[in-house]
């Protein structure tokens, strides 16, 4: 080939992530359906695989938070406005992981859908809040995005501050409805509710070379393995360099992640888990203490309920993945989980947790029926903004 393909696209920030957004109808025909052609296109657009880890020849920025792609299309489900598909693009190998959602970029989907003409104009108020009903196709769940509008257009600027994002913007409220996994997708080892694949809120997870760790393994927002910070030698106040600059630590967390993936029934073998790095996530929790965030701002113990640090695609996240925040909110709402215990125990409708960039509040409504827990919805606020629009070439 001697000429590049020119494809309409929008480069957006959503929450603490960035990604390339496409309308399905704008993709080349062979990339409008799942498969090798679509993956190859997104890899080329984002700049992967890159043995240098920088993605210089693409739209990625060499981190899991910025190596992402989103495809939005007209709704295929009743009572929804759009379908949303997320691809986590590996940086150093030719792989796109479609196994989970990105909660941060979910904040940008509604705005993109409105501005791309995918939402009925009659549903967009001249001044107010547009309610965009999103079908998250990766996990088969509904997300309700509340998008502020001014003059019939999406309002992007405002005074809402999100730790991990430099500039304030307009607040986007997201509702993740029934975020736990469906029973049929909960895995081969599920013995009770789909939200807890093992049927327990705390398990003993045996990890060769590391030991037996107490773990809460939950399918809500995204499959997540929560462990106690002190059990692996940490305080919960760590910033990125403390983990990402330590090859031993990264290898340890990946070992925990792969063994947890098998225990949750997400995969059958450790080798399969290694080939699917986007899910599950692994996070460590601790009771609240004061610390200095990566921005230099002091976070005080009295202002948070607990500490959480989470890894994404093999690295400690600079803030918090949106889907992991849903898992945190869900686990905090259920008495007896490690997240709930770190926050002081008891019934909780919301928690504010400390992460490397600052704090985040997430709410969740949980109900128990016949001994099984169900999270009705999780709610959090993010923001989103168009950074550039036009065409990408691949």
Image (cartoon, rainbow, N blue to C red):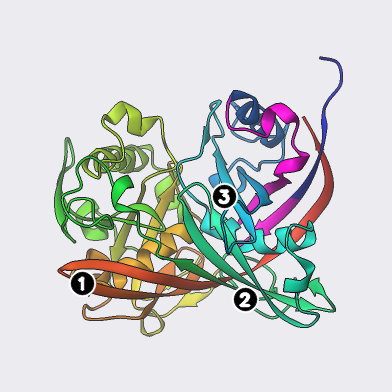
Give me the residue at 40% from left, 65% from top.
178
Whole-number angstrom distance, CA of label 2 to CA of label 1: 38 Å
Describe residue 247's horizontal placement relative to residue 41 as left or right: left
Q: Is residue 23 magenta?
A: yes
The boundaries of the magenta stretch are 11-35
Q: Quadrant of the C terminus?
A: top right
> Left or right: 394 with respect to 229?
right
Depth check, mark 2 against mark 1: the one in front is 1
Q: Residue 65 shows which numbered tag? A: 3
| Cβ atoms under marks 2 and 1 closer than 8 Å | no
Q: Quadrant of residue 162?
A: bottom right
Q: Residue furthest top?
A: 1
Q: Earlier in the sequence, mark 2 or mark 3?
A: 3
Q: Residue at x 65, y 52 (%)?
A: 18
Give coordinates of residue 28: x percent, y percent.
Answer: 75, 31
Q: Nearer the viewer, residue 207 or 78?
A: 78
**Quadrant of the image occupied by residue 165:** bottom right
Residue 135 shown in magenta: no
Question: Which residue does the numbered mark 1 point to in the structure image?
Answer: 369
Which residue is under mark 2? 161
- 123 relative position to 151: left or right: left
């Amino acid at each position: 080939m001697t000429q590049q393909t020119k494809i309409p696209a929008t480069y957006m920030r959503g929450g603490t992530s960035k990604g390339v957004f496409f309308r399905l109808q704008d993709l080349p025909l062979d990339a409008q359906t799942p498969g090798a052609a679509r993956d190859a296109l997104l890899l080329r657009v984002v700049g992967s695989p890159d043995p240098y880890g920088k993605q210089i020849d693409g739209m990625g920025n060499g981190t899991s938070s910025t190596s992402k792609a989103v495809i939005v299309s007209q709704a295929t489900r009743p009572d929804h406005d759009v379908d949303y598909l997320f691809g986590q693009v590996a940086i150093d190998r030719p792989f796109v992981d479609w196994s989970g959602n990105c909660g941060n970029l979910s904040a940008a989907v509604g705005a993109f859908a409105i501005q791309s003409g995918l939402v009925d104009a009659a549903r967009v108020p001249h001044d107010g809040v547009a309610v965009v009903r999103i079908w998250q196709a990766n996990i088969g769940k509904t997300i309700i995005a509340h998008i502020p509008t001014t003059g019939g257009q999406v309002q992007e600027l405002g005074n809402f501050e999100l730790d991990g994002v430099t500039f304030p913007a307009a607040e986007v409220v997201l509702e993740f409805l029934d975020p736990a996994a469906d029973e049929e997708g909960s895995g081969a080892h599920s013995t009770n509710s789909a939200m807890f694949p093992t049927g327990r809120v705390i398990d003993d997870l045996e990890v060769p070379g590391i030991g037996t760790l107490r773990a809460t393994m939950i399918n809500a927002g995204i499959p997540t393995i929560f462990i106690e910070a002190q059990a692996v030698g940490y305080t919960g106040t760590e910033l990125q360099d403390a983990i990402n600059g330590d090859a031993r630590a990264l290898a340890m967390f990946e070992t925990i992640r792969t063994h947890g993936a098998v225990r949750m029934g997400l995969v059958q073998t450790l080798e399969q888990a290694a080939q699917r790095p986007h899910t599950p996530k692994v996070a460590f929790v601790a009771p609240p203490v004061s610390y200095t965030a990566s921005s230099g701002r002091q976070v005080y113990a009295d202002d948070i309920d607990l500490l959480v640090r989470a890894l994404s695609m093999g690295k400690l996240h600079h803030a918090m993945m949106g889907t992991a925040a849903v898992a945190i909110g869900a686990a905090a709402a259920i008495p007896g989980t490690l997240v709930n215990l770190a926050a002081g125990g008891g019934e909780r409708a919301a928690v504010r947790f400390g992460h490397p960039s600052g704090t985040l509040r997430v709410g969740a409504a949980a109900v128990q029926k016949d001994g099984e827990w169900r999270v009705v919805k999780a709610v959090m606020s993010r923001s989103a903004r168009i950074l550039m629009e036009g065409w990408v070439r691949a």
